[in-house]
Amino acid sequence: MAVIDLHSHILPGLDDGARNLEEAIEIARSMADDGVGVVSATPHVRDDYPTSPDAMEAALGLVRSAVAEAGIALDVRGGGEIALDRLGSLADDSLARFGLGGNPRLLLLEYPYHGRPLGLEHECARLRQRGIVTVIAHPERNLSVQERPGDLEEVVRAGAVVQLTAASVDGRLGRASAGCARRLLELELAHLIASDAHAAGVREAGMSQAAAAVGGGELARWLTSDVPAALLEGDELPARPAGLRRRGGLLGRLRR
């Protein structure tokens, strides 16, 4: 199964990601070379980057055409990375159009870098009651989560899915986020890895590096292919590979 990347900033000119179509194509090519077969383009949807569904879809069309013309084997789909404080101001139709990979019942929510968002578990539970699954983006980069990773358990119990950044998992973003990513894996509070690619550079690829960092094999496939595929299809998440435990085995070795 091909690698599926559900978080990227490949659409040009919408946020702090790709600045132009040339950069978008460079990112797309590096992803395909790294084994990614499907990527969800998720521009920021927040006060400083108030991306509209129309703008996202227009940019998506341009990138899809350019990727095809360049002969790059990459399926680029839509989405959005929605700030928590924007949820209440977005109409249901807009939320659906920002659905990850074209799934209107799958939303990517941006976890802040500082502080603990109050009531997040209640918001995730409310959305789940409406049939919407929330994917929480890169909480391992939050200072509060780094200090108390177990706090995410309430959010996961509320039905949310946790996404780690590839560059956190393999250490490219530093020891603090790498250590937190490992701990969330140990606690079974992380479900998938995504690139969060912004530009040609440190985060434009690296899914294979992250897969290697967790030991490869079944766990890597679960984090980069099996879970993302199930989310896109609206299926139940597959069980973690047999033999994985919080301590010992492969997850235990991640601590060392």
Image (cartoon, rainbow, N blue to C red):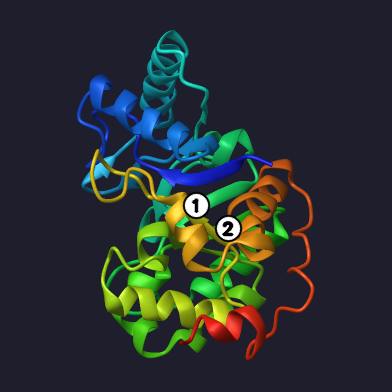
Q: Quadrant of the N terminus?
A: top right
Residue 6: x %, y % from top left: 51, 46
Q: Is residue 88 visible?
A: no
Q: Residue at x 39, y 73 (%)?
A: 140
Query: In the shown orientation, is residue 107 left or right of residue 48?
Result: right
Q: Residue at x 64, y 49 (%)?
A: 225
**The quarter of the displayed image where residue 190 is located:** bottom right
Q: Element under label 1?
A: strand
Q: Pick whichever, 155 or 202, lies toward us.
A: 202
Does label 2 or label 1 sit earlier along the sequence? 1
Residue 234: x %, y % from top left: 74, 46
Q: Read off the residue under disc 1.
A: 108
Q: Residue at x 33, y 71 (%)?
A: 141
Q: Amino acid at mark 1?
A: Leu
**The quarter of the displayed image where residue 243 is located:** bottom right
Q: Is residue 219 visible?
A: yes
Q: Residue at x 58, y 76 (%)?
A: 189
25 above or below 81?
above
Mark 1 is surrounded, within 10 Å at the Cα level, by few (under 14), some (14 to 19) or many (20 or more) other residues, namely many
Residue 218: x %, y % from top left: 69, 62
Q: CA distance from mark 2 to mark 1?
A: 6 Å
Tell me whether circle 2 and circle 1 mark residues in contact (CB < 8 Å): yes
174 above or below 3?
below
57 above or below 222?
above
Query: In the shown orientation, is residue 129 left or right of residue 170?
Result: right
Q: Element under label 2?
A: strand
Q: Pick whichever, 207 or 256, lies toward us.
A: 256
Mark 2 is surrounded, within 10 Å at the Cα level, by few (under 14), some (14 to 19) or many (20 or more) other residues, namely many
17 above or below 106?
above
- Label annotation for residue 134: 2
Residue 244: x %, y % from top left: 71, 78
Q: Amino acid at mark 2?
A: Thr
